[in-house]
Amino acid sequence: MVSNCANPNCGKPLHYLREGRIFVFDVPTGIEGPNGKRTRRLEHFWLCGECAQKMVMQQSAEGIRAVSRPQSRFRREVTAATQYMAS
Ligand SMILES: [Zn+2]
């Protein structure tokens, strides 16, 4: 299981699961199982509350890493929150 924030620039230790965000990825291991299919395993990553505000975990050909959240989406969420507070 995870014990630290997945952002390499943060590395905050995980104390409370309710803080931040957990990401689960289905990762192929490259090992063939008894049925000839490649086995997969679940990998868990945690971003602390602060990092989850501005980053997401993303799976690409190079592996899984923390990346900045798309700006447009972030702006839309901010707008929605502002509208909610105003109503
Ligand atoms: Zn963090």
Image (tube, helix red, strand yellow):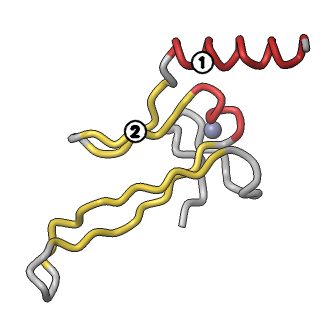
Residue 43: x, y in percent? 42, 61
Residue 76: x, y in percent? 62, 14
- Relative horizontal placement of residue 76, taking residue 30 as reference (left or right): right
> In terms of depth relative to the viewer, which is nearer, 42 or 66?
42
The quadrant of the picture occupied by the N terminus is bottom right
- Ligand 1 sits in which quadrant? top right
Residue lying furthest bottom: 34
> In terms of depth relative to the viewer, which is nearer, 83 or 19?
83
> In terms of depth relative to the viewer, which is nearer, 78 or 41?
78
- Relative horizontal placement of residue 84, taking residue 55 as reference (left or right): right
Residue at (40% x, 65% y) in the render: 42
Question: Toward which corner of the image does residue 32 lie, by quadrant?
Answer: bottom left
Q: CA distance from mark 2 to mark 1?
A: 16 Å
> In terms of depth relative to the viewer, which is nearer, 28 or 62?
28
Residue at (62% x, 12% y) in the render: 75
Mark 1: secondary structure: helix
Question: Local crowd at mark 1 within 10 Å, few (<14), some, or many (≥20)?
Answer: few
Residue 51: x, y in percent? 63, 33
Q: Check residue 74 in the rendering and tell me which mark sits there, or answer none.
A: 1
Amino acid, disc 2: Gln
What residue sits right under mark 2 in the picture? 58
Q: Earlier in the sequence, mark 2 or mark 1?
A: 2
- Relative horizontal placement of residue 77, taking residue 32 as reference (left or right): right
Question: Local crowd at mark 2 within 10 Å, few (<14), some, or many (≥20)?
Answer: some
Please tell me whether mark 2 or mark 1 is closer to you in this view: 1
Total marks shown come to: 2
Question: Toward which corner of the image does residue 82 lie, by quadrant?
Answer: top right
Amino acid, disc 1: Phe
